Amino acid sequence: MPLEVPRAVLEYTAKVVDERISDNAVVERIIERAIAQLRSKVSTFQRADYALRYLLYRVYVGESDFLRAAGMLAAAHLDAAVFTDVERATAYIRIAQNYLKGDDDVNAERYLRRAGDVPRLDVFELTVQYRMALAQVADCKRKFLEGALRYLDVMRLVASAAVAEEEVADALCKAAKCAILGPAGPQRQRVMGTLMRDERLHTIPPAVFAMLDRMYRERIIVASDATAFAATLAPHQRAVGADGFTVVQRALIEHNIKAAGKVYKAVSFATLAGITGIEAARVERIAAKMVSERRLAATLDQLDGMLEYAAGGGGGGASTGGALAVTGGGSAVSAGSGGGGVPAASSGAGVESLLVWDDAIKAACLRLNATVEDIVRAHPTFAPA
């Protein structure tokens, strides 16, 4: 028979199943059988295959089986010419959203890239969903400042549109959480400033607002103050990193090291250990990393065990220049933000450069001692002097 007939029958079957069968188990059996029958001929019935898959997708979403739902749509032949750009982009974004709900940010990012490759569409709702998904991917990958900026981008996009207040409040709350969890430095301070000026900030949970306000004002925060805030976080935002700290703990430690510059011009690592609740040696390493990444304008004096803040209270302002310094025979490094909070090198490279600097000082001291000993052996009369 002509191909138009079975195509119409299959699409009609999907419509009837959708409208007349409410038992998900029955729907699942019918659609799985139909998809299996089409498998060898799917290139001929691409639209019908997608229509059937979309029914199962909705069933799985209703059961909160998000990964299965994403996989069901992902198996469709969406690159076929029978689909319009809008249909193709819509499907890719739906797949990415469900991978995100299933905590699979890798596949979510992959399908968002495919959605981004679709020609530009003047479809407002799709654009909002796409940008929101990009923000969620950055959030899940713990690129918190990037996530905060992307959430703010979504908020700017919907500012003049008739978007539900709940959606705006959700984006604003997620942006605030990402800003709080982001690495301390000038860029985070600017993001927080943008959030604090938003008139809709009162719609976010009080625990999130309180933490955002205290961090923006650069006040020292104790761990107990963060308990209510930590309870509002998603699982990936409470994960433990390779350094043994949770994301929240890392954010609080870096914030308190920076905030101490509002109280001290110079502070010992032992005092900072008391403020942050960790060992002095770990405080020193974290402070060194922040300085090397130009997120903290300060100088480390390892000989005296001190952190000396630059003018401005350790704020890492954009006007502060970066410089390498040696203090009291120990290794030290000082740097301003210079590049607007963007690291000049990776964090590993920054710490590595400090270690290389230490080794160079050690080698110079050993050579000096050896030279003095050679002189004393060759000219014993110089020794008393």
Image (tube, helix red, strand yellow):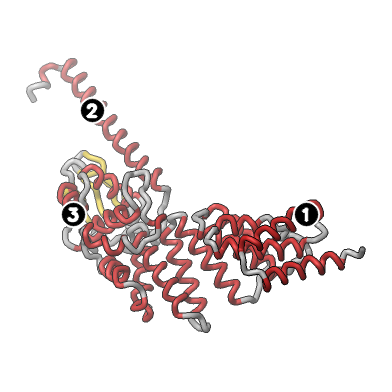
Q: Earlier in the sequence, mark 2 or mark 1?
A: 1
Identify the mark at residue 275; answer none if there is no mark: 3
- Disc 2: which residue: 368
Does the image show residue 382?
yes
Quarter in which the N terminus is drawn:
bottom right
Name the quarter where the C terminus is drawn.
top left
Which one is in front, 77 or 171? 77
Q: Is residue 231 left or right of residue 82?
A: left
Residue 270 % position (x, y): 16, 47
Q: Nearer the viewer, mark 2 or mark 1?
A: 1
Q: Earlier in the sequence, mark 3 or mark 2?
A: 3
Whether label 3 touches label 2, CB < 8 Å: no
| Disc number lying in front (1 or 3) | 1
> Residue shown at 67%/58% (left/top)?
29
Q: Nearer the viewer, residue 333 or 8?
A: 8
User: Is the residue under label 1 in contact with that under label 2 (CB below 8 Å)?
Assistant: no
* In this view, 209 is above or below 66: below
Residue beneath the point at 27% across and 35% down: 361
Which residue appears farthest toward the left when viewing the image?
A: 384
Label 3 residue SS: helix
Q: Which residue corresponds to mark 1?
A: 37
Q: Which residue is rendered at x = 39% and y = 57% of the image?
A: 237
Report the amino acid beneath label 3.
Ile
